[in-house]
Amino acid sequence: MKVNDLRQLSDNDLLSRLNDNKENLQKYRFQKSIQQLEDHRLLSDLRKENAKIKTVLREKILNKDNSNG
């Protein structure tokens, strides 16, 4: 998902998406360890999306702080 699309989501949506990604990442890591994961690129894609989500959440926090004070 692109960063601009993530910026349009609410905080709760972002947090739930982050939690879902973490669960999927754990599942994919387990599948990789037992050599059942066919597409290893899924791991890096999920990690990158998690980083994007965390960045957008941090931007929202900083924008709220700047607008208040």
Image (cartoon, rainbow, N blue to C red):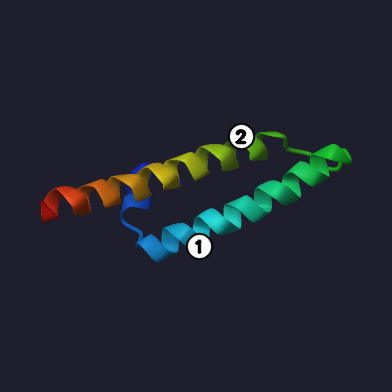
Which disc, if any, is residue 44?
2
As drawn, 12 above or below 40: below
Task: Report the front residue among 39 and 30.
Answer: 30
Of the image marks 2 and 1, the number of the one nearer the N terminus: 1
Q: Is residue 10 visible?
A: yes
Residue 39 point in image, percent of width and height: 73, 37
Q: Amino acid under label 2?
A: Ser
Q: Which residue is mark 1?
A: 16
The picture quadrant where one finds residue 2 is top left
As drawn, 65 above or below 12: above
> SS at mark 1?
helix
Q: How many marks?
A: 2
Q: Is residue 37 visible?
A: no
Q: Residue shown at 59%/52% (left/top)?
A: 21
The picture quadrant where one finds residue 64 is bottom left
Q: Residue shown at 12%/55% (left/top)?
A: 68
As drawn, 12 above or below 69: below
Q: Are the two marked residues, 2 and 1, in contact with CB atoms closer than 8 angstroms?
A: no
Viewed as shown, does residue 11 lie left or right of 28?
A: left
Spatial separation of the CA atoms under disc 2 and disc 1 = 19 Å
The picture quadrant where one finds residue 55 is top left
> SS at mark 2?
helix
Viewed as shown, does residue 39 lie left or right of 2?
A: right
Q: Residue shown at 66%/55% (left/top)?
A: 23
